[in-house]
Amino acid sequence: MAGRLHVQQLPLARLLPSLKMAEPLIESPNVAPRQPISAIRTVEGQPCLESLFWGLTPPWLKVLDNAPHCARAETLNQRGMFQEAYRSRRCLVPVSGFYIWKRLPRAKQPYLVTQVNRGPLLLAGLWCRYHTTLTAYNDSTALVTVPANACLSHLTDRLPAVIDPRDADEWLNPDTAHTRLDRLLTPAPLELLGAFPVSKQINFPTYQSPACAHPTGPMIRWTTS
């Protein structure tokens, strides 16, 4: 699953022309959980970019460190923490890539997963609201994960679900039928994503250099030959 995000230079206005930028995009080459991230959700019938806390915090959660930053697609209708949000509070997290780690005998090698053409990605998410007072509240989110496709499954068993921009309105609409939502939560097309190794410096959340996204090896991508 995704433990870090890469968010930089996203052409959101071109990707989603009807998007309202209520807040500026939060950019970082190395975003860790339990930090603010930019997410798109429907506000008064219009997709709107706002800041959410990355780690789902329902009102009954007592320990912030237990706030999940990812949710398995297969259990969204079964776990109480995610069920209500899946039914009516869905969002999209725009990223330029996300990091995964391949297990090796003595260590883990980080990889940056991006669209093969390095274009932006929209990751499926859920959000919830926690009222701290009658008028004040905190909103938070978790990414939805699905099984990794055949191209990247040797690196990790799960990846964030990628929503095609053409399906963005359907994913965000609280009235979309669950059967349709389930069909959107499938492994990414084989030709869409690639992954390349990066420096282990990204293991440190404080490492914010553009070098986070510099390949240290070739991109793994799907080929038909």
Image (cartoon, helix red, strand yellow):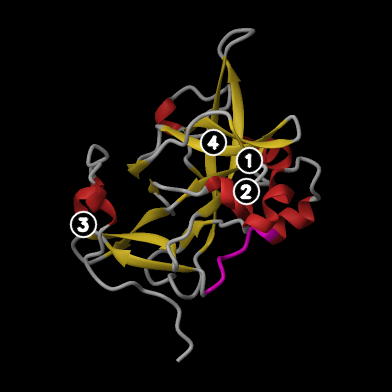
Residue 139: image quadrant is: top right
SS of the residue at dot 4? strand
* Residue kind at label 4, given as amino acid type: Thr
* Residue under pointer 3: 199
- Magenta region, residue range: 184-190
What residue does disc 4 label?
A: 141
Q: Can you say whether 45 is above or below 185 in the image?
A: above
Whether residue 124 is visible to the viewer of this picture, yes or no, is no
Task: State the residue at coordinates (77%, 57%).
Answer: 180
Query: Identity of the amino acid at label 2?
Result: Leu
* Residue bearing the label numbered 2: 16
Q: Residue 19 carries which label?
A: 1
Give the spatial CA distance, label 4 vs label 3: 27 Å
Residue 93's spot in the image, x, y percent? 53, 44
Q: What residue type is labelled 1?
A: Leu
Give the label, 4 or 3, closer to the camera: 3
Q: Are marks 1 and 2 in contact (CB under 8 Å)?
A: yes
Magenta stretch containing residue 185, yes or no?
Answer: yes
**Answer yes or no: do the residues labelled 2 and 4 have beta carbons within 8 Å?**
no
Alpha-carbon span between mark 3 and mark 2: 32 Å
Question: What is the x, y in percent for residue 223?
Answer: 45, 84
In 3D space, how far apart are the residues under numbered discs 1 and 2 (Cα atoms)?
5 Å
- For the point 56% across and 57% down, the residue is 162
- Secondary structure mainly formed by the magenta segment: loop
Question: Which mark lies nearer to you, 3 or 2?
Answer: 2
Q: Position of residue 191 (x, y in %)?
A: 51, 74
Q: Does the magenta stretch include residue 101?
A: no
